[in-house]
Image: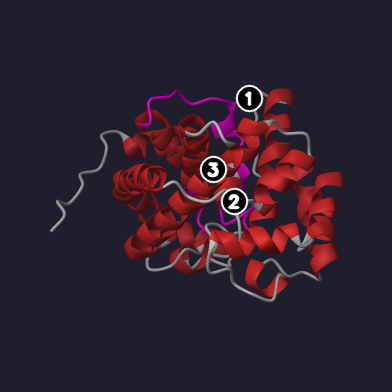
């Protein structure tokens, strides 16, 4: 039986300071992996609220996956192997988060529509803020344990090289290898879970990096780059945001997803995101 993990001291205070669950989890996991918070973590801010307040996967998951993807890059000099590591570890993060929260989706966990002012007020007055703070506080050590264990196990097993839709989009947008691998775990709707599109989240993050560098003190959820991406994405998909509906399938393995991308799957959508 596994020992219950204790929350890291100061997590709630850090959450309050950074202002978003996504940035907080990136910071904590990156710190536990032995690295400091950089602009990459601040660029995760728009993923809070389930991808620009759309209610999809919790920002804490996106932030944790970013830190894990970055660590995957550090642990493997081969890009395909690093992508495979990131996807495998993100699958473990999704499993861990689901056990803790009961769902991966922000709107289901909080009961809040983040684009509705009345829903936000109701969320705040009914104790919703402590709900999120407690989740981040409790899940952070579990997230690191899940990611670290998965990375160690996957590396030892020498996973086959993989391709990620998120990595492909980032590369088409001009990202370097490290940034492209950092978002690799977003593949297939975050760790192949079929939920909110990982390529969209990756594009938002890459654009947000540029925004953070232009506006070093701005952490706005609605920077103009990200808002345009959401608009162009929904125009292309008819408003659909779920990976499994866009692709007409839910990928069971990284190999399935790799073949899908190799065969031109989602190529047009990735081009729309890259050019937006």
Quarter holding the N terminus is bottom left
81 inside magenta stretch: no
Check disc 1 and report the residue beneath it: 217
Closer to the chain start, of discs 1 and 3, is 3
Residues shaded magenta:
33-60
Q: CA distance from mark 2 to mark 3?
A: 7 Å
Q: Is residue 148 above or below residue 256?
A: above
Dot 1: element = loop
Q: Quadrant of residue 204?
A: top right
Check disc 3 and report the residue beneath it: 81
120 vs 84, nearest the viewer: 84
213 vs 169, nearest the viewer: 169
Residue 189 visible in the snapshot: no
CB under 8 Å between discs 1 and 3: no
Prevalent SS, magenta region: loop
Left or right of 73 on screen, residue 248: right
The picture places residue 267, in percent across and down from the top left corner, at 81, 58
Q: Residue at x 55, y 57 (%)?
A: 190
CB under 8 Å between discs 2 and 3: no
57 inside magenta stretch: yes
Closer to the chain start, of discs 1 and 2, is 2
């Amino acid at each position: 039986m596994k020992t219950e993990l204790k929350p890291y001291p100061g997590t709630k205070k850090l959450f309050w300071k950074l202002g978003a669950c996504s940035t907080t989890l990136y910071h904590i996991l990156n710190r536990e992996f032995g690295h400091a918070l950089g602009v990459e973590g601040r660029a995760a801010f728009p993923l809070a609220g389930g991808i620009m307040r759309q209610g999809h996967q919790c920002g804490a998951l996106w932030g944790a996956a970013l830190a894990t993807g970055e660590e995957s890059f550090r642990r493997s000099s081969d890009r395909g192997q690093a992508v495979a590591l990131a996807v495998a570890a993100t699958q473990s993060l999704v499993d861990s988060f689901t056990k803790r929260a009961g769902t991966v989706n922000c709107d289901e966990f909080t009961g809040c529509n983040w684009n509705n002012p009345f829903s936000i007020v109701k969320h705040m007055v009914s104790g919703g803020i402590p709900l999120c703070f407690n989740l981040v506080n409790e899940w952070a050590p579990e997230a690191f344990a899940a990611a670290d264990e998965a990375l160690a196990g996957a590396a030892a097993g020498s996973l086959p090289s993989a391709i990620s839709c998120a990595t492909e989009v980032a590369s088409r947008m001009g990202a370097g290898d490290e940034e492209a691998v950092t978002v690799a775990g977003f593949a297939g709707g975050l760790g192949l879970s079929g939920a909110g599109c990982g390529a969209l989240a990756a594009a938002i993050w890459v654009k947000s990096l540029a925004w953070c560098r232009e506006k070093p003190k701005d952490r706005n959820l609605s920077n103009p780059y990200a808002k345009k991406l959401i608009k162009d994405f929904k125009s292309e998909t008819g408003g659909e945001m779920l990976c499994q509906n866009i692709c007409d399938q839910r990928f069971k393995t990284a190999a399935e997803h790799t073949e899908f991308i190799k065969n031109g799957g989602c190529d047009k959508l990735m081009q729309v995101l890259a050019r937006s």
